[in-house]
């Protein structure tokens, strides 16, 4: 649907606008271009999380294009209202009570595109909100094997870059050339050229700041047509490994804790050695098949997941003297764009 963006706000608090129950009186309508996308009030965030938890978002916005995303971010900033940027919701736990807006990248409609070809070398442009399933399908159709290790990864391109996702030894930054992003501090569009020093295990220059990834360019290699069968088999083999490890057997947020390669600490193995597999808190449970997976047995709350994570950390510290570090994010106001503590990051 297409809306004037001012419908996001109401100049007076009233019962007909659920958003006003959280933010109260906001502002007079803007005189701005039209906004294209979905606007929802009191949206259940369990629908937008692979763990299936999260309360009602007072305002949930799904822009259909980059311009609308930028307009929405600018409007929220001008109104002084913090918001959280959500991709695939695959490693994020939103709270049971959400006092901030959600800006989702999932409905951005820009398709993947091969923007430059030089023999076998190809520059592949991917929008931030594109799911890796669609990326992998596109790559198989175009004989590009670069992202085969991400086959079955449930998140988005932008989310993988923010977290520098790593699967089967391949990291999101490995093939990265550049990133287009909106900086909510100055509302300007910027281009970041990859500097390898900015990335490390689960770290990127897009964490803890007001930079919103819009798209990214990657250096990939296109194989000749006769290799198409091999390329598809490669993607299928990585997907099969995830299925064999039961990654899709129940709602989860993927690996809960980071591994520490330098100290040879494998979180799942450590948790298993502590005898914690199968441990429950409410509707959240440590998977019987993998110590580093917490699953939702059907009625888990965000608090259940948070409490179970704390229990694991406490038990591992007591039994192994190891301080596990979370890989999943527990989203709070302090992580939102527009929050004072989030300003001025890297």
Image: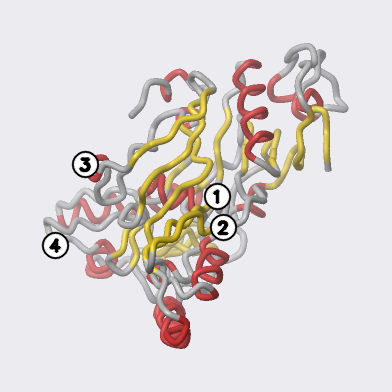
Residue beneath the point at 46% across and 28% down:
210
Residue beneath the point at 38% across and 36% down:
192
Q: Is residue 78 left or right of residue 21?
A: left
Question: Outermost residue, right direction?
Answer: 16
Number of residues whose C-alpha sits closer than 10 Å to that of mark 1, classed few (under 14), some (14–19) or many (20 or more): many
Q: From mark 3 to mark 4, how far is it between C-alphas?
A: 23 Å
Residue marked by disc 3: 197
Residue marked by disc 4: 264
Find out whether the residues at labels 4 and 2 contact each other: C-beta distance under 8 Å: no
Mark 4 lies on a secondary structure that is loop
**In the figure, 163 relative to 346: above or below?**
below
Q: From mark 4 to mark 2, how far is it between C-alphas?
A: 38 Å
Find out whether the residues at labels 2 and 1 contact each other: C-beta distance under 8 Å: yes
Mark 1 lies on a secondary structure that is strand
Sequence-wise first label, 4 or 2: 2
Residue 260 image label: none
Find out whether the residues at labels 3 and 4 contact each other: C-beta distance under 8 Å: no
| Quadrant where the image shows the N terminus | top right
In this view, the residue in front, 69 or 117, is 117
Number of residues whose C-alpha sits closer than 10 Å to that of mark 4, classed few (under 14), some (14–19) or many (20 or more): few
Q: From mark 3 to mark 2, how far is it between C-alphas?
A: 27 Å
| Quadrant where the image shows the C terminus | top left
Residue 68, percent across and down?
69, 34
Sequence-wise first label, 2 or 1: 2
In the rendered view, how is the structure colored?
secondary structure
């Amino acid at each position: 649907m297409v809306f004037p963006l001012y419908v996001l706000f109401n100049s007076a608090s009233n019962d007909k606008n659920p958003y006003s129950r959280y933010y109260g009186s906001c502002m007079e309508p803007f005189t701005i271009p039209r906004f294209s996308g979905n606007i929802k009030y009191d949206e259940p965030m369990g629908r937008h999380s692979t763990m299936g938890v999260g309360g009602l978002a007072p305002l949930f916005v799904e822009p259909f294009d980059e311009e609308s995303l930028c307009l929405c971010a600018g409007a929220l900033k001008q109104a002084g209202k913090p918001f959280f940027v959500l991709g695939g919701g695959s490693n994020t736990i939103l709270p049971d009570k959400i006092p901030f807006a959600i800006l989702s990248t999932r409905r951005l409609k820009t398709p993947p595109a091969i923007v430059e070809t030089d023999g076998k070398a190809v520059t592949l442009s991917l929008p931030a909100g594109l799911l890796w399933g669609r990326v992998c399908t596109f790559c198989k159709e175009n004989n590009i094997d670069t992202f085969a290790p991400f086959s079955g990864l449930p998140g988005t391109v932008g989310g993988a870059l923010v977290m520098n996702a790593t699967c089967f030894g391949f990291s999101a930054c490995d093939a990265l050339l550049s990133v287009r992003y909106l900086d909510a501090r100055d509302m300007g569009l910027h281009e970041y050229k990859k500097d390898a020093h900015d990335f490390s295990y689960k770290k990127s220059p897009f964490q803890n700041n007001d930079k919103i990834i819009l798209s990214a360019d990657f250096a990939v290699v296109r194989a000749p047509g006769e290799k198409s069968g091999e390329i598809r088999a490669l993607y299928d083999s990585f997907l099969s490994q995830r299925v064999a490890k039961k990654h899709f057997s129940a709602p989860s947020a993927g690996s809960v804790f980071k591994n520490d390669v330098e100290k040879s600490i494998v979180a799942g193995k450590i948790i298993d050695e502590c005898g914690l597999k199968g441990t429950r808190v409410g509707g959240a449970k440590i998977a019987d098949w993998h110590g580093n997976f917490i699953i939702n047995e059907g009625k888990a709350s965000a608090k259940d997941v948070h409490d179970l994570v704390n229990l694991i950390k406490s038990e591992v510290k007591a039994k192994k003297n190891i301080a596990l570090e979370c890989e999943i994010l527990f989203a709070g106001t302090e992580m939102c764009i527009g929050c004072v503590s989030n300003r001025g990051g890297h």
